[in-house]
Image (spheres, rainbow, N blue to C red):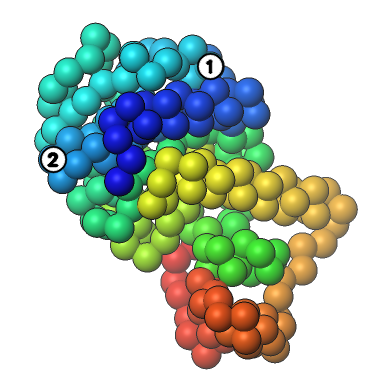
Amino acid sequence: MPSEEELRKEIAAVCRRIYAKGFVAANDGNVSARLDAGRILMTPSGMSKGDVTPECLVVCDLAGNKLSGDGKPTSEVLLHLAVYEARSNLNAVVHAHPPYATALTVAGVSLAEPVLPEVAVTFGKIPTAEYATPASPEGPEVIRKLIGRFDAMLLDRHGTLTAGRTVWEAYFRLEKVEHAAQVVFLAHQLGQVRTLTPDEITRLVAALKRHGITAKIAEPTETEDDG
């Protein structure tokens, strides 16, 4: 586990990257990471991610109570805590509002179908959580239905939630989700979105196994009902 100083620097760097990429606007978005078994380091409420520094981060306990820091914890603190409660193997969470992924949820377009091989390998599928009022207890409830199996998801009309073993892994999963959303958006503009066939999925899984890689995508005989 990185030291607190290292985690502070990583979160600040990721925040700047998120802002520079246009994945958030104004004061939107939040990033957090586990410090230890009982403490979470997270971005403060009301601050542009482009202005986040290592020193301005807030430390909370697992109930969301502030332990140290000058600002208030992000208003989405409960969303982050729900991830850590559900998955002991996840140590970082990024919530952002990337335009293409968010637009797909506004239009009711799903990313759950297997379209891009690299996305299927990384995520299996990218489900969309039910709509929940932002900054309310509804958020944790809707993501609990999915976070046990998925490391990335769309939040209906509220952006994305990605998690990882490290801050950078959570961030790069955000990049991959937004890239997939952009490709699907453009494909819709061109008039057709083709999905991987069961045979193509079988061959993809087999090819990865030969390289010692376990794909996240389910075998064609398995079915999921999350969309």
Percent across and percent down for residue 19 are 57, 23
Residue at the disc numbered 1: 50
Mark with earlier residue (1, 2): 2
Q: Dot 2: few (<14), some (14–19), or many (≥20) neighbours within 10 Å?
A: few
Whether pointer 1 and pointer 2 mark residues with C-beta atoms closer than 8 Å, the reply is no
Q: Is residue 76 left or right of residue 208?
A: left
Q: CA distance from mark 1 to mark 2?
A: 28 Å
Tell me the amino acid under the disc marked 1: Gly
Percent across and percent down for residue 72 are 25, 15
Q: Is residue 172 left or right of residue 70?
A: right
Q: Is residue 87 left or right of residue 6?
A: left
Q: Is residue 189 above or below residue 69?
A: below
* Residue found 47% across the figure and 53% down from its top: 152
Percent across and percent down for residue 207 are 67, 84
* Residue found 14% across the figure and 33% down from its top: 61
Is residue 124 in view?
yes
**Rendered image: mark on residue 193:** none
* Camera-nearest residue between 155 and 201: 201
Q: Is residue 150 above or below residue 51?
A: below
* Residue found 32% across the figure and 20% down from its top: 57
In the current view of this chain or complex, which residue is farthest to the top?
Answer: 70
Percent across and percent down for residue 10 are 44, 31
Tell me the amino acid under the disc marked 2: Gly
* Badge 1 element: helix
Q: Quadrant of residue 80?
A: top left
Residue at the disc numbered 2: 38
Q: Is residue 123 above or below residue 59?
A: below
* Camera-nearest residue between 213 and 126: 213
